Image: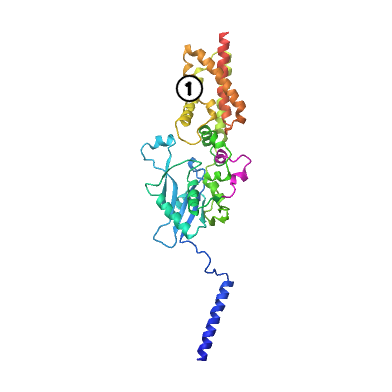
Amino acid sequence: MKAIVRIFALFVVMMATSAVDARAAGTPDSTAAPRPAVDIYFMTFYPGGEVYELEGHTAIGVVHRADRKVPPLAYNYGVFDFEAPGFVWRFATGRTDYMLAPAPLDLFVDYYRAEGRRVVAHRLALDSAEAEALARALAIESLPQNRTYRYNYVLDNCATRPLAAVERVVGDSICLGPAPYEAQSLRPLTFRNVMRSYHVNYPWYQFGIDLALGSLIDRPVASRAAAFAPAELDRMLGSATVGAGGRPLVAETIVLNDVAPAAAVRAPTPWYLTPMAAGCVLLALALALTVRDVCRRRVCRSFDTVLFGVYGLAGCMLTFLMFVSEHYATSPNWLYIWLNPICGVAAVLLWIKSAKKVVFWYQICNFAALTGFLIAMPWIPQGMNAAFVPFILAEMTRSASYIYITNKNRK
């Protein structure tokens, strides 16, 4: 009996010693929060080669670790239906209806890897209840009756939607880290300036944006607003916290395709193919024709018809964007002083003899308006593309030549 007691006592001592050694070795105790059965990943796919890929893309990855029967999914807020009735007209008028759609996570990631784009996944530090709630919410939101939303390229897009979904689950605001743009640039933090930082190699695309979008995207915004660009948001997530307590949002960051952020972006456009080069060529041609016209005292109506006709068509486009479409930030647009449908009317009236007086006074008013616009340009609260200047000067040159030649011939 004594031997049995001694053996039992020795067994108890050995078990107690093992427990002490385990704690000393750093084994987590029973009070440590277990890892959720569902992992939520904030996934960023860095810029691609197409113009609509230049700010990158975002999706939410959901992985059910405890239930292998449920496939890992990527919830993508950037889906739209080309075959929907009236798609082109609805898209042109600003009724941009996008959808949330799930896709197999592995295939989704492989697609962007194949394009040579950097892929980063942030595993969110959510507890079990939060992770499961977000997985359920995404599944419900992706149902056909719930999945459609009105897309806005800076206020409600594929990056801001996932961020808002996470905030709803944690029940508190997410404090993102500082915007990388702020640390890299001396220019104010505005939507247009953030866009420009990603469009450096695509000057014609930025030229079109600067034509179409007005002063609303030039108002200074808070650092968080830069998160509309997925690539910008990705670099702000590393130091992101939740609520006043400062709980870290990200538990782990995994680089799934470790290439340079701009690896898939195309090479810069050669300088001789940029809008500035095209504007300078147009200005040189306008000056050369003006010298010839002044010498012969006759206006080259064919050139002016093409020039003012193209500007008039651009003015019609701005009229549509400003007064018909629902696109965000197309109005007000200060470029309407320069590009408006009246330019096209002048192109037609050039060929009507009885309208000479009307064209003469139009050219006087046009020259005065463009001169005032150029002088005031540095103070206009709208970001101006530098390439606008030679295009405006070309129009001013032709207006001045018409005024001078008409006045000379009258005398």
Q: Is residue 227 above or below residue 2?
A: above
Q: Residue at x 61, y 44 (%)?
A: 182
Q: Position of residue 53 (x, y in %)?
A: 49, 43
Q: Residue at x 49, y 22 (%)?
A: 342
Q: Secondary structure at mark 1?
A: helix
Looking at the image, residue 146 sits to the left or right of residue 209; the answer is left
Q: Position of residue 216 (x, y in %)?
A: 54, 35
Q: Is residue 322 above or below residue 12?
A: above
Q: Is residue 106 visible?
A: no
Q: Between residues 17 and 297, which one lies in front from this camera angle? A: 17
> Which quadrant of the figure contains the C terminus?
top right
Q: Which residues are magenta?
A: 176-196
Q: Position of residue 386 (x, y in %)?
A: 59, 32
Q: Residue furthest right?
A: 186
- In the picture of the structure, the residue carrying the numbered disc 1 is 344
Check disc 1 and give the amino acid type.
Answer: Gly
Q: Position of residue 394 (x, y in %)?
A: 56, 24
Q: Residue at x 56, y 26 (%)?
A: 392
Residue 335 lies in magenta, yes or no? no
Q: Between residues 34 and 83, which one lies in front from this camera angle? A: 34
Q: Residue at x 44, y 52 (%)?
A: 74
Q: Is residue 25 above or below residue 147?
A: below
Q: Is residue 138 visible?
A: yes
Label 1: few (<14), some or many (≥20) within 10 Å? many
Residue 185 lies in magenta, yes or no? yes
